[in-house]
Image (cartoon, rainbow, N blue to C red):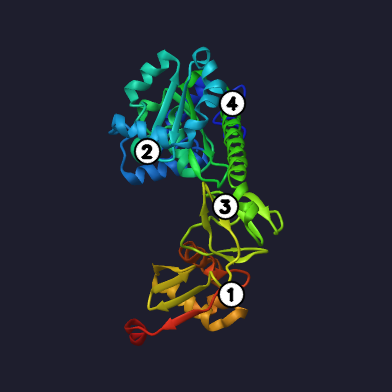
Amino acid sequence: MTTAPAFGAIAPGTDLSLHARELVRIHDAVLSGVRPPERPRALVARSWTRVMRMGLAADRVNERRPMTVDELARRRRTSRLSLVIDELRRVLTSVADASMFLVVVCDADGVVLWREGSARVQLTADRLGFLEGMVWTEQVVGTNAIGTALAEAAPVQLFSAEHYENQQHPWYCTAAPIHDPRDGELLGVVDVSGPALTLHPAIGALVESAVRLAEASLWRRHREGLEALRRSTEAVVSTASGPLLVVDDHGWVAHHSGVAERDRIDVPRADRPVAVPGLGLCVPERLGAGWLVRPADSARTISARLEGCTLEVDADGGSWLAVLTPRHAEILRLLAAAGPTGLTAAALSASLFGDPDHVVTVRAEVSRLRRVVGALVATNPYRLSVPVERRESAVDRRV
């Protein structure tokens, strides 16, 4: 068997008919529990293992359950992919009929939001349940480029019997994840599928190019949104005193004054303090479609109290409660005891686990804790941004 470049399933010059027959033998052997004539690709082997553990059948079409019309419409309407579906159509759909393939765009849950392309290929896809509103994850339909791209968080191309279900063997599928350039969030998957024996080695590059163009379009819209936010808040900002930032809901900076320019800060929330280099501890304030971020002053004090696993924070005249896990409460107590010098990850590991070897676990726990308490926990080293008063509770006394 020849080796395919990058994530492709075939190499240039591959005899597709011969390769398809070889893959059928490998597929049948692996699923029968006997030694295959050759090993499947590592990506395919991982996916088959996951699917077999789920108990899906290979010799029939596993049950598909379509979304309701209203739910599909809602997903289309709320998906950021709706902003770039026209760009994807221009790149991919224009050649779909001539190239005998379908263009499919799914959301991050594997739900098919849009499907366009060759009418003849669509009829075949209909019989497989490859329809708008259907879920095409590995858990539902077995190994397929869409579901496997979601599972692997990477582009995937599958050819013929690399698919798990026998009924999908006449197909090739090429899928690439598409992300929100603002925060890296997975938005969904762009897929091109068609008859297996029509697969061309350039299909993978075509799909990746479409994804890059769509992500670039989303980034342009993001920059335009920041400029609109800057203009809409100019009047308020011009009358404010002291250093400040104006940021969007994802923490991207639209305007700065009295502080060094930076691209982004932590995601702002009205009930969580945020630490900003050059500004210190701040309590974000809603300003139009964005946030005004400026240092806490004497009129905007922040204090915190920990009782058992309940953290109470007073900020800018308001207060909020957070119920912590016992581990997170223990971390806060250790940091409070350490004072302003704080603790390194290794020192925190020694206090929590009795040795300094659990640094990775400590960093993950502190990261999860900061999602709850925001910048109350500072880093490098780990320390508290404001004093946390500890109140003894019944739980503490039992411990």
Q: Nearer the viewer, mark 3 or mark 2?
A: 3
Q: Which residue is mark 3?
A: 251
Q: Which residue is mark 4?
A: 206
Vertical relation: 67 (above or below) 282: above
- Mark 4 vs 1, N-terminal side: 4
Q: Which residue is mark 1?
A: 346
Left or right side of 78 for 250? right
Q: Amino acid at mark 1?
A: Ala
What distance separates the C-alpha of mark 2 from that of mark 4?
32 Å
Q: Nearer the viewer, mark 1 or mark 2?
A: 1
For label 3, count other residues whose C-alpha is less than 10 Å away and answer few (under 14), some (14-19) or many (20+).
Answer: many
Q: Nearer the viewer, mark 3 or mark 1?
A: 3
Q: Amino acid at mark 2?
A: Leu
Name the image quarter holding the N terminus: top right
Judge by depth and name the residue closer to the eye, 37 or 285.
Answer: 285
Mark 4, secondary structure of its residue: helix
Q: Is residue 96 visible?
A: yes
